[in-house]
């Protein structure tokens, strides 16, 4: 059975624990679109219908 218990010691390492991940072209284009546009969402409280306005900055 795996379990963890507390310790007074600090976790220290010299290695970088995060891995660099390559991003696909689709994700890059999606990120650039989101960064270059402004999104406004308006919800009608009586009907619950949402209206989204997207404008280029």
Image (cartoon, rainbow, N blue to C red):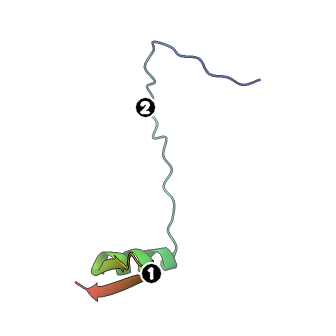
Q: Secondary structure at mark 2?
A: loop
Q: What label does residue 47 carry, if any?
A: 1
Residue lying furthest right: 1
Is the Cβ of the residue at disc 2 closer than 8 Å to that at disc 1?
Answer: no
Who comes first in sequence, dot 2 or dot 1? 2
Residue 52 percent location from the top left of the image: 37, 83
Which one is in front in this view, the residue at disc 2 or the one at disc 1? 1
Residue hosting label 2: 14
Residue lying furthest top: 8
Q: Secondary structure at mark 1?
A: loop
Residue situated in front as seen by the camera: 25 or 38: 38
Residue 46 percent location from the top left of the image: 41, 78
Distance from Cα at disc 2 to Cα at disc 1: 56 Å
Using a 10 Å C-alpha cutoff, classify the residue at mark 2 as few (fewer than 14 neighbours), some (14 to 19) or many (20 or more): few
From this view, report whether residue 37 is shown above or below residue 8.
Answer: below
Locate the N terminus and report the quarter of the image it occupies.
top right
From this view, report whether residue 5 is shown above or below residue 43.
Answer: above
Locate the C terminus and report the quarter of the image it occupies.
bottom left
**Residue 2: quarter of image:** top right
Residue situated in front as seen by the camera: 47 or 35: 47
Residue 56 percent location from the top left of the image: 26, 87
Residue lying furthest left: 57
Using a 10 Å C-alpha cutoff, classify the residue at mark 1 as few (fewer than 14 neighbours), some (14 to 19) or many (20 or more): few
Q: Residue at x 46, y 36 (%)?
A: 15
Residue situated in front as seen by the camera: 24 or 43: 43
Q: Residue at x 38, y 75 (%)?
A: 45
**Residue 33: quarter of image:** bottom left
Residue 44 percent location from the top left of the image: 37, 79
Q: Residue at x 53, y 16 (%)?
A: 6
Q: Residue at x 34, y 79 (%)?
A: 42
């Amino acid at each position: 059975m795996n379990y963890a218990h507390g310790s007074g010691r600090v976790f220290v390492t010299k290695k970088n624990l995060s891995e660099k991940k390559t991003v696909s072209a689709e994700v890059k284009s999606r990120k650039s679109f989101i960064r270059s546009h402004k999104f406004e969402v308006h919800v009608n409280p009586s009907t619950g219908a949402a209206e989204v306005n997207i404008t280029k900055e």
